[in-house]
Image (spheres, rainbow, N blue to C red):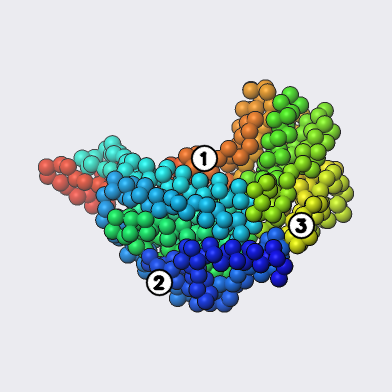
Amino acid sequence: MNSLSQYACDHLAELLKGFGLAAATPLSNWIDGALVAGEGEEITLINSATGEALVSYCDAGTALIERATQAATRGQREWMALTASERGRRMNAAIRGLEGHEEALAQLESVVAGKPIRDCRAEVGKVREMFEYYAGWCDKQHGEVIPVPTSHLNYVRHVPYGVVGQITPWNAPMFTCAWQLAPAIAAGNGVVLKPSELTPFSSVVIAQLLECSGKFGQGLPKGLINIVNGLGKSTGAALTDHPTISKLVFVGSPQSGRMIAEAGARRLVPSVLELGGKSANIVFADAKLDEAVAGAQAAIFAAAGQSCVAGSRLLIERSVFEQVTSRLARAAEQIAVGLPSDEATRMGPLQNRRQFEQVTRMIEAAEAAGARVLTGGKRPEGLPDEAHGYFIAPTVLVEVTPDMEIAQQEVFGPVLIAMAFNDEAEAIQLANETRFGLAGAVWSQDVARAHRVAGQLRAGTVWINSYKAISVMSPFGGFGDSGFGRSSGLDGLREYTVPQSVWVETAPEASVAFGYGSGVG
Ligand code: NAD
């Protein structure tokens, strides 16, 4: 093992010890208010920067899913026995459990996920934001009164599903964990969440800090939140198939999303799918080009392109195509690519070998199909000798046609394709020419045109003269292969409740109709 790998292993061991997860095999689950080791096959995590082993833990397996669902059922009953305002107070109290642990949590994520430390610190901040926002919703989930044409008082209230199952990916483990946990419990549900097998620990630590901050009894009830770690095919499948789970919320690839939706459909359980993207970033010639170039660069190269909303297709008006692409290539070459632990690093390695191989293969296939690499496409220069992990330099491809795989499929890496368009109609056509529909952006100083184009994009989120502005307050989700259902905001909260209609007879002498009553059916 080289010295970089050894340093990361030692650092991780210290962090796991600090959070109480250290044991013969790390305690990789949080179930019924306690840390628990997995019982299934061993899973070895690999250091993204060096490609060498980092730590091993054990798959949770079916028996732990059973324990977790039972705990969530008990925790949810206790939670719903509280008043709505008390639940809000306790969520706010729970988030204070993270105080003083933010830096260690960011370090833990940086080592395991291979993400730049500065990005991990920002992600911890998002956890807090999401809990604070949804804590505020606890006592504001009003029902409605419907003016029915009979003597009844008819009201609707929004009731929780019970226990929900959540599955998250490896690219933003803390963000996606808090993104789904917070609305689920604010709506009154118990939760069993399975993070990606590649990034197991941060969600366990978050759940532990949240639940323990009130020391059970003043904070979140024991068992309200359970985190189980393991492979999709074993622990993930046991979760989606478990009869207690009455709603599935999945964040991940379209391929796995289909399996999750199918598993839900078999049991008639609804699902929310937050899947991948191939988002179009449209630059008109009248845009402020300095800002458009900076925006395009951040849209694709932040998180090494491992972001569902990555602006991976840059559509540029033909008259400024050469100018924008050459400026972008120069800007891409300036990005500080380096070790996740280095404070100066803006872009780290890809998270895992499978992703690295997929990105490499897709670049090669694009070149074979006629695309030209303007910059990147290979290992970046200037890395330490021992960093022979999954690094790929920021890459810009031109001479791409819309029918190529690289123009249609999600790369999930630091790879931007640039294509030219002649007019507004062609820009819209190109933008909508994929099966995905997660996000998109329009850069133009013509306000009317910017709104006109935004309105015609088949995308769940559209930015104008901006990219990646995302808030927990605003709904987020996709069309087509990017999934269905919404997260964030009130729409995200409503995904975790079912409207229940209650009819109360108010007439002094109630008459119960036989059938639908007069005038109906
Ligand atoms: P993935 O689909 O391979 O895995 C996601 C999760 O699903 C993991 O926890 C995995 O263990 C689990 N899983 C896989 N098969 C399963 C099965 N049969 N049953 C139950 N669980 C199963 O995705 P990934 O590679 O981890 O993440 C990358 C993908 O996630 C990209 O496509 C990216 O765009 C997408 N993503 C989407 C959003 C969004 O909000 N739309 C956010 C982040 C990532």
Q: Is mark 1 within 8 Å of ligand 1?
A: no
Q: Amino acid at mark 1?
A: Ser
The tag on residue 471 is 1
Label 3 near label 2: C-beta < 8 Å? no
**Alpha-carbon neighbours of circle 1 within 10 Å: few (<14), some, or many (≥20)?**
few
Report helix, strand or loop for mark 2.
helix
In this view, which residue lies farthest toward the left?
508
Q: Earlier in the sequence, mark 3 or mark 1?
A: 3
In the image, taking residue 478 as reference, residue 512 lies left or right, namely left
- The x, y position of residue 308, in whole percent, is 62, 49
Dots 3, 1 in contact, CB < 8 A? no
Q: Is residue 337 above or below residue 19?
A: above
Q: Is any part of residue 503 visible from this angle?
A: yes
The residue that disc 3 covers is 384
- Residue closer to the observer: 41 or 514: 41
**Which residue sits at x=50%, y=70%?**
22
Element at badge 1?
Answer: loop
- Describe residue 406's horizontal placement relative to residue 247 as left or right: right
State the separation of the CA atoms marked 3 and 1: 37 Å
Count neighbours of disc 2 (C-alpha within 10 A) and say few if under 14, some if 14 to 19, many if 20 or more: some
Q: What's the residue at 41%, 44% (across, down)?
A: 132
Which residue type carries mark 3?
Pro
